[in-house]
Amino acid sequence: MNIAQLQQEIIRLKKEKDVCILAHSYQAREICEIADYTGDSYKLSVDASKAQNKNILMCGVRFMAETCKLLSPEKTVLLAQPMAGCSMADQMDKELIAQVKENYPGYTVVAYINTTASLKTICDVCVTSSSAVKIVGKIPNKDILFIPDCNLGAFVAAQCPDKNIKLLNGGCPIHACVTADDVKAAKALAPDAELLVHPECVPAVCAMADYVGSTSGIMDYAVKSDKKEFIIGTEISIAEHLQYMCPDKRFHILSLKLICPNMKATTLVDVYNCLAGCGGEEIKLDDDTIRDARRCIDEMIRLGE
């Protein structure tokens, strides 16, 4: 089968088997085209919880599928590619943070959504890159332990100077590897372009940007802007998606280093095989994990309103 035929067969199977397909924005174009919903990890989880389908297929990484299960425990949640993990989410586990919490009694533990369900069970509130500043600003406690991304945490700390934010040495190795020299090189090639970067980038890179925000924030900014040229400082697939969305504008990638192998692991054939019953993995979480991990997500929803 060619790509178009495979896509048509996937569309047929998802209708036949009552499956809602979610595709993170970093997924390949051909996968996004057959998805019912696309977007960032939290948006997809909310979309999944509202969908009428009994089955959810996540084209993304494991923590995203887990978050879908937390918000929709009654649904069958499938991960298209079982090997698709997240380097950041795997950096810190429940046991490590439990020990760290002992050194910071009284601190409110804020967990980036890019964490495992197990770790979320001992955290106080969850945040996304788009809601982190707003939510941390609303937390009554001055003392915050922000995990795992120190770059996003530094961005939040700069916006919330009244908070005492403790950061750990963690984060997205893909975004964090981009340097100020990479920015200078990209600007030399596209001097008239605005620089849009994700807050998972190091502070030196964020300081050089015209806009710093979440994946969805970057895309919204580029679409709505009257500017015609942009350097995109997040996973390179976003520049491609934006080029399709805005053919009258030009989009440049900030660095070739911005390629996430975990996001690239999922293929259209993986999606087909999962729907055909010969691939993928069902995400299963025990009742205690679902109950305890939901608390920090429910608090995120409350404070994010």
Image: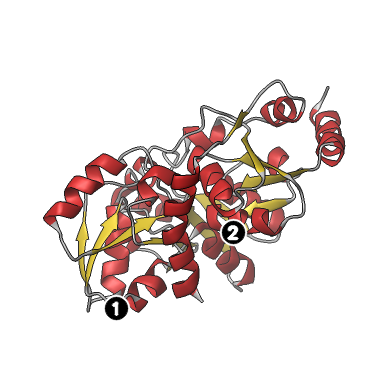
Which residue occupies 57% across, 36% down?
Answer: 283
Q: Quick check: 97 left or right of 1?
A: left
Q: Earlier in the sequence, mark 2 or mark 1?
A: 2
Residue at the (85%, 41%) spot, across then down? 15
Q: Which residue is mark 1?
A: 140
Q: Is residue 245 above or below residue 223?
A: above
Q: Secondary structure at mark 2?
A: helix
Q: For residue 32, which numbered disc appears in the image?
A: none
- Residue 277 vs 61, above or below: the answer is above
The residue that appears at 65% across and 30% down in the rendered structure is 267
Residue 43 numbered mark, or none = 2
How packed mark 2 is, by other alpha carbons closer than 10 Å (few <14, some 14-19, many 20 or more), is some
Locate residue 277, reporting x and y percent: 73, 24
Seen at 27% across and 46% down, the residue is: 170
Q: Mark 2: which amino acid?
A: Lys
173 over 124 or under it: above or below:
above
**Could you say where residue 3 lies in the image, as x and y percent from the top left?**
79, 30
Comparing labels 2 and 1, the label whose residue is closer to the camera: 1
Q: Is residue 1 left or right of residue 280?
A: right
